[in-house]
Image (cartoon, rainbow, N blue to C red):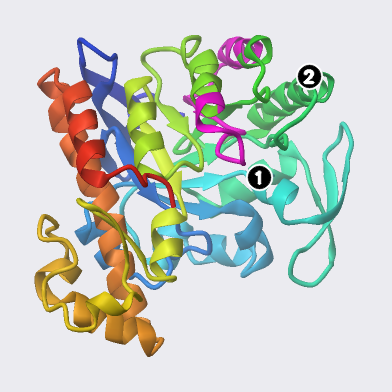
Amino acid sequence: MNSETFFLEIKHIDKKTGARYGILHTPHGNVEVPMFMPVGTLATVKTLSPEEVKEAGAGVILANTYHLSIRPGEDVVAEAGGLHKFMNYDGPMLTDSGGFQVFSLAQNREITEEGVTFRSHLNGEKLFFSPERAMEIEQKLGADIAMSFDECCPYPVTHDYAEKSLERTLRWAKRGKAVHTRKDQALFGIVQGGEFKDLRERSAQELVKIGFDGYSIGGTSIGEPKDVMKKMVEYGVKYLPEDKPRYLMGVGSVDEILDGISQGVDMFDCVLPTRIARHGALMTSSGRVNIRDAKYERDFTPLDAECDCYCCKNYTKAYLRHLYKCDETFGKRLLSIHNVRFLIHMMEGAREAIKEDRFEEYKNEFLAKFGDERGF
């Protein structure tokens, strides 16, 4: 990657927590960190247009290598001019390697040194992913940031299995980097190692030796207790370079994001805000709202009086409940707009707090208002 087109510029570090505020420079624009990145698995953030995602304040959007390689196929996307043109999004994009989906969705996996043989979750077709294959797909998709192909260990797992998996993942990281040739695309390494301190530390140290444009913390938010997850992040982060972006993968709950920021993480993503919105669950400044509840039938107030999103500025809980009960697509769109904007707005507040050395206070105040029911 050309360091003139992709680099992290750290502007301020919170004096109490070590939380970082900075600017991530990419070929498709500059974005502030820490940030939350909406997930557009199939080159679309579900139910939302690219314009609506941008209006919500999003910078980077994610897309999924595994899913897009099956439908419509990476060659179709490449022929369209890459992901940005294919989905009409002119901001920065990131593609994961498909590793998590291979290990979580695919059936009958066979892991070898060469790669993973598995069957499609759609039709059972036999497929093969390797570091080289993942890089081939990601380079054709053409996002600003590509992820290394890794194995996401299940939780819990034995130290022996985690160690063998980690060593193979490191070898895969080297192989992926060796065939990554796009100068306009950054490549991130992924810290693995289960819940084990020695493995997480080794993973981070070895990835830094290989040398990547940024570093991700993987294998978290897969069923482990929150205190275990915090340690997983802690073990790896302290060995990562301060001048490179740090990305905690698959984390979208309020408390886990704020904890991650405290630990020096810059980037977060999750399908959670849009997924729970489609089921009527909303994040608000006063806690969780289940819009399907009967108490909202005649509630003609906004969903969240402190929110500035299109949904909250224009529609009432009563109307949103009506749409949800009628299974109207417009309702799912409005609820998704709100949840995405809620997390992005939270990150805007976090950035301001970091610049003023008051992130710890911001975090505690936010969680106190959000309530004890932090997870979804």
Of residue 24 and residue 358, the one placed in the foreground of this image is 358
Range drawn in magenta: 201-228
In magenta segment, residue 203: yes
Q: Return the x and y of residue 32 as percentages of the image width and height.
A: 24, 35
Q: Return the x and y of residue 252 as percentages of the image width and height.
A: 42, 45
Image check: 94 left or right of 130? left
Residue that carries the numbered disc 1 in the rendered image:
100
Image check: 177 left or right of 82? right
Q: Return the x and y of residue 184 as percentages of the image width and height.
A: 44, 38
Tell me if residue 27 can be seen. no
Residue at far front of view: 295
Considering only order in the chain, which callout, 2 or 1, is on the residue closer to the N terminus? 1
Q: Which mark is residue 183?
A: none
Image check: 105 left or right of 266? right
In magenta segment, residue 137: no
Q: Quadrant of residue 68?
A: bottom right
Q: Return the x and y of residue 77 as percentages of the image width and height.
A: 54, 63
Q: Nearer the viewer, mark 1 or mark 2?
A: 2
Q: Quadrant of residue 261?
A: top left
**Residue in the image at 46% along x and 63% along y:** 275
Residue that carries the numbered disc 2 in the rendered image:
159
**Residue in the image at 74% along x and 46% along y:** 103
Task: Answer whether labels 1 and 2 touch (C-beta < 8 Å).
Answer: no
Spatial separation of the CA atoms under disc 1 and disc 2: 20 Å
Looking at the rendered structure, the kind of residue marked 1 is: Phe
Circle 2: is it few (<14), some (14-19), or many (20+) Cα within 10 Å? Answer: some
Q: Quadrant of residue 159?
A: top right
Looking at the rendered structure, the kind of residue marked 2 is: His
Of residue 293 and residue 332, the one placed in the foreground of this image is 293
As drawn, 249 above or below 62: above
Element under label 2? helix
**Residue in the image at 68% along x and 14% along y:** 199
